[in-house]
Image (cartoon, helix red, strand yellow):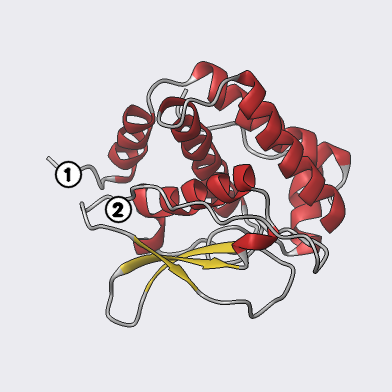
Amino acid sequence: MLRPAPPSPTMFLALVALSVVACLDTVFCRHASASQTYDVVPPPVCKNHNGEVVSFIDSGSARPGIAAGMARRDADGKPIVLRSNYSAAPPVFQSFIDRHECAHHQTGDVDRLHPPRNGPDHLMNESISDCVAVLRLRDEDGYDKAGLDLVAAALRHEMEKIGFPEISISSRISNIENCFLKLGAPREYIERVLKRRGLLQP
């Protein structure tokens, strides 16, 4: 099945109340202490659904202590991912952020009409990008179950600090675990998404 299970009504209401998003916002953030820093990992290879190379750009430290990624096109129309304060997040989480934001380019989200923030279609886009991210970590970076557990633990830590209820946290982690264990190669998954959206290149 291509589409991950939609969020429960409780999860949806929690997300609306918190107004925390990933694509073009900062769902992946780390409120680290000012003294705790990490080495910044190199970005992954990323091309969008049209074959354009996506550039990863350090956008500086506008919000100290918070690491975040943002997928968009720049003023010249070039696809980019802005990386903010990555040294505030552990490497495993930096890698997850990068691949999640890249997925918004790979699946065409950035070039489509953005659905209402925190609405069902928006949350589905985020779930799909989560799937692509963990599949790439598994197949391209060699993450095993132990690696997945590190990603899940980092995600849980951040969501708890932001204030998500347990049902929201466990639902998202369950989606990631199901993708990691059951779905095929990331390219095949992305192609199915693009085909359904009418964006698959011949």
| Mark seen at residue 201 | 1
Q: Which element carries disc 1, helix, strand or loop? A: loop
Image quadrant of residue 87? bottom right
Report if residue 123 is visible in the image. yes
Residue located farthest toward the left when viewing the structure as drawn: 202
**What residue sits right under mark 2 in the picture?**
48
Judging depth in this view, the residue of 21 and 87 nearest the camera is 87
Judging depth in this view, the residue of 22 and 145 nearest the camera is 145
Q: Amino acid at mark 2?
A: Asn
- Position of 173 compared to 45: left or right? right
Report if residue 9 is visible in the image. no
Q: Which element carries disc 2, helix, strand or loop? A: loop
Mark 1 or mark 2: name the one nearer the start of the chain: 2
Question: Vertically, is 100 above or below 64?
Answer: above
Residue 24 position, x and y percent, is 53, 66
Image quadrant of residue 150? top right
Q: Amino acid at mark 1?
A: Gln
